[in-house]
Image (cartoon, grey):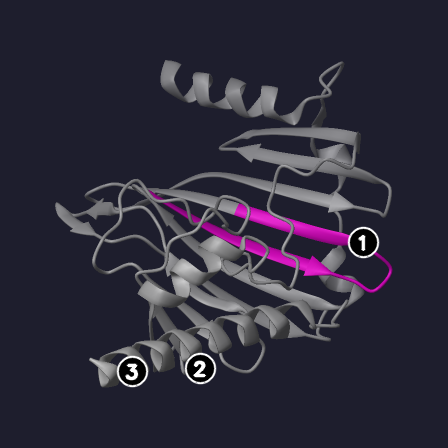
Amino acid sequence: MLVIIILFIVRVGRNAIILKQIENKSQNNIYSNYHVKCWKYERDMLSIVDAYYKEDGRYLIRTSNYAYSAEQEDYINEKIEYFDGSKSNYYITNNDEKIAHIAIDSVTIEPVFELKNYHINSNNFITFILNSIFVDIKSEKCNEIDCYAISNFENSYSLYGFFHKNTKRASDVIYVNKENGLTVRAPGYSITILDQTIDGIVDLYYEFNSVYEVNLQEPDASEYTIAQGENDIKNHDEYIKNKNVEN
């Protein structure tokens, strides 16, 4: 019995140390010039997000959405947010329709990729201890990166809603970069392609000190119809969704 208790304490202690190290490493990232690329599978939708951040606080986030059909990968729309440090301009392309929302207050609708790990948070002590007890942590390669593969992990934190799941699956594993504590892969929604159900995943790729002015090139507003009197960008998303249903 004593041996079992000792092994249990060692296991929980090891898990707690690794989880805390991951949290600390991700919070200590000091990069202010970086690029995050995200591939997100959500049901039958693929979203590819490119987010570019500069030292002066400006950023550009481009989201391209694709819907899968049995025959081909169909393009749906593209959303670009350009933030100049105080105001955001949104450029939305939906097939042949192009609409711009200019000088919107800085409440972004796209995920702002801070260099933190939102899965792991020790602020809630009870949740942190429970995770340390039940979590399984292994060393594995993911996308050619040395990672911790973390399974049986439950908490309420996610990267701006990207990793919410309908149900917990046996395949749900979070892969975390050992070096910087950032999430490399996380579970997503299951999707069906060509009559095959595939567990959804979210892959993230990071580049540091690699963002230049060319990456922050704002679209030409003259090529878009300027939205009038519509301050809530979500209203336009709902409009586009309803229009697609009508068509």
Answer yes or no: do the residues labelled 2 and 3 have beta carbons within 8 Å?
A: no
Secondary structure mostly taken by the magenta-highlighted segment of the chain: strand
Residue 54 falls in image quadrant:
bottom right
Q: Which residue is mark 1?
A: 58
Q: Nearer the viewer, mark 2 or mark 3?
A: 3
Q: Earlier in the sequence, mark 3 or mark 1?
A: 3
- In the image, is residue 46 part of the stretch drawn in magenta? yes
Query: Which secondary structure lies at badge 2?
Result: strand
Q: 205 or 67: nearer the eye?
A: 205
Graded by Cα atoms within 10 Å as few (under 14), some (14 to 19) or many (20 or more), the crowding at tag 2 reads some
Please identify the quarter of the rendering in which residue 25 is found: bottom right
Q: Quadrant of the C terminus?
A: top left
Name the residue at 68% across, 43% down.
Answer: 81
Name the residue type under label 3. Answer: Leu
| Bounds of the magenta segment | 45-63
Which mark, by number, is residue 7?
3
The amino acid pointed to by label 2 is: Ile
Front label number (3 vs 1): 3
Image coordinates of residue 47 in percent, x first then y, are: 45, 48
Examine the rendering and report whether any part of residue 181 can be seen. no
Q: Is residue 61 left or right of residue 22?
A: right
- Marks 2/3: CA–CA distance: 30 Å
Going by the numbered disc 1, the residue's amino acid type is Arg
Residue drawn 68% across the image and 22% down it: 232
Q: Residues within 10 Å of mark 1 (few under 14, many from 20)?
A: some
Q: Residue furthest left?
A: 195
Residue assigned mark 2: 145
How far separated are the C-alphas under marks 2 and 1? Answer: 29 Å
